[in-house]
């Protein structure tokens, strides 16, 4: 049996890691977790309750690096895994350094960011390259990430393994009426005959929310009772978004900082909009897949994983980048055409279930760990 240690930073609740912990072949692999965060995360207790080895290291950022590396190294020397698998920036820096010092020969990291450092924080690209150097294997979660690693960061293609995120689609299908109503009441979203337009994105420039709000403002001319829901509503682009929201009547929008029952929230949407500003900004874009699994018709720009499977008028309405006019026209079309809406929902659900099942991802992970 091989010992595999996951090292994660600033992860609180995560269905993805719960699914991995539940589904990995425990006859072949013994999983353990090292969680780095400013407070003990939900995932820590979830793992402990299931008897999975788990360590928590208090970590607040760069000032914590020396101590976190030392503590991670101590844990690795104690449990002696054959493989470490790091996720997210701090965990990659800390975990891969500690893994190298501990003499662990298989050091894997999953690359979760795309061009954000290249476009917004160029001084951080050297850290991405350092992480790439320390890794013996790199998991690219989309062709976009694979291309960035090879073409922009000079990584040997033989080091890269393409493993898209996998999903347990039952989480989005088996959502009870009680759960949906609980979320509806929580945010007072009683709009049974009024369209609800959903957005789930942090307030970040490259997410393109600044093009959705003007489109929604215009749709109010036709659907005066339409309601815009902005979930994950915080981030470095907050001031700019708030200026745009002031142009909307307060009764027509709701901001949600964080909703744990995301599957139930999707079920309240009549349509879903996600419009990153270019094809490379998203490393993956799991909300494309989630919305389609939840049977919500989508209006999108194609970024990250969307480049690989989304087709205009087949499984979503595709609009050009940075264009509020086209987003408005797509909203108007979708809200007025039930036949198109039904067709998009059916095709999208089938496409994501065929491509992104959790068992496919687990199979590829086990294949990589078993090399």
Image (cartoon, grey):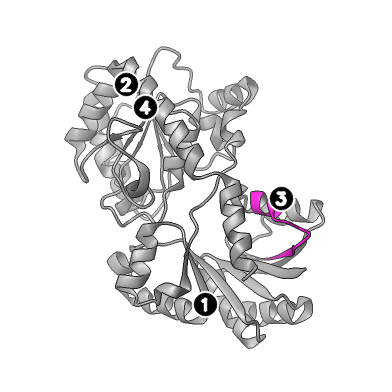
Q: In this view, does 23 lie to the left or right of 133?
A: right
* Residue 236 horizontal/vertical position (percent): 37, 55
Distance from disc 3 to disc 2, alpha carbons, whole Å, reads 38 Å
Answer with mark 2 or mark 1, whichever residue precedes in sequence: 1
Residue topped by disc 1? 135
**Which quadrant, please, contains the N terminus?**
bottom right
Distance from disc 1 to disc 3, alpha carbons, whole Å, reads 26 Å
Q: Residue 340 carries which label?
A: 2
Q: In this view, does 69 lie above or below 45?
A: below
Q: Is mark 2 on a helix, strand or loop?
A: helix
Answer with mark 4 or mark 3, whichever residue precedes in sequence: 3
Answer with mark 4 or mark 1, whichever residue precedes in sequence: 1
Q: Residue 22 carries which label?
A: 3
Q: Which of 202 and 250 is in front in this view?
A: 202
* Residue 216 horizontal/vertical position (percent): 27, 30
Q: Nearer the viewer, residue 129 or 367?
A: 367
Q: What stretch is highlighted in magenta?
A: 19-33
């Amino acid at each position: 049996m091989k010992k595999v240690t996951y090292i994660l930073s600033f992860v609180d609740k995560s269905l993805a890691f719960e699914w991995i912990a539940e589904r990995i072949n425990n006859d072949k692999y013994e999983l353990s977790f090292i969680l780095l965060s400013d407070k003990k995360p939900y995932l820590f207790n979830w793992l402990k309750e299931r008897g999975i080895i788990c360590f928590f290291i208090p970590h607040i950022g760069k000032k914590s690096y020396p101590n976190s590396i030392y503590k991670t190294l101590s844990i690795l020397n104690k449990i002696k895994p054959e493989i470490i698998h790091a996720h997210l920036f701090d965990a990659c820096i800390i975990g891969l350094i500690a893994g190298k010092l501990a003499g662990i020969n298989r050091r894997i990291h999953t690359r979760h960011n795309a061009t954000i450092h290249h476009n917004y924080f160029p001084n951080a690209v050297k850290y991405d390259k350092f992480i790439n150097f320390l890794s013996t294997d790199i998991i690219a979660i989309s062709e976009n990430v694979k291309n960035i690693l090879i073409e922009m960061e000079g990584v040997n293609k033989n080091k890269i393994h393409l493993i898209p995120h996998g999903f347990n689609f039952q989480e989005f299908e088996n959502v009870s009426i009680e759960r949906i109503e609980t979320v509806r009441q929580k945010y007072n979203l009683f709009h049974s005959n009024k369209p609800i337009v959903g957005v789930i994105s942090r307030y970040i420039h490259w997410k393109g929310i600044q093009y959705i709000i003007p489109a929604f403002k215009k749709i109010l001319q036709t659907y005066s009772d339409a309601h815009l829901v902005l979930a994950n509503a915080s981030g470095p682009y907050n001031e700019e978004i708030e200026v745009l929201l002031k142009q909307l009547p307060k009764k027509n929008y709701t901001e949600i900082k964080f909703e744990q029952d995301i599957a139930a929230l999707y079920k309240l949407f009549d349509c879903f909009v996600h419009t990153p500003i270019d094809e490379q900004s998203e490393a993956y874009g799991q909300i494309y897949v989630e919305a389609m699994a939840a049977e919500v018709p989508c209006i999108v720009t194609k970024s990250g994983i969307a480049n690989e499977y989304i087709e205009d008028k087949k499984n979503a309405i595709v609009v050009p980048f940075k264009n509020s006019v086209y987003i408005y026209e797509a909203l108007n079309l979708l809200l007025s055409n039930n036949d198109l809406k039904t067709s998009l929902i059916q095709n999208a659900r089938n496409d994501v279930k065929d491509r992104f099942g959790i068992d496919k991802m687990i199979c590829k992970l086990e294949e990589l760990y078993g090399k």
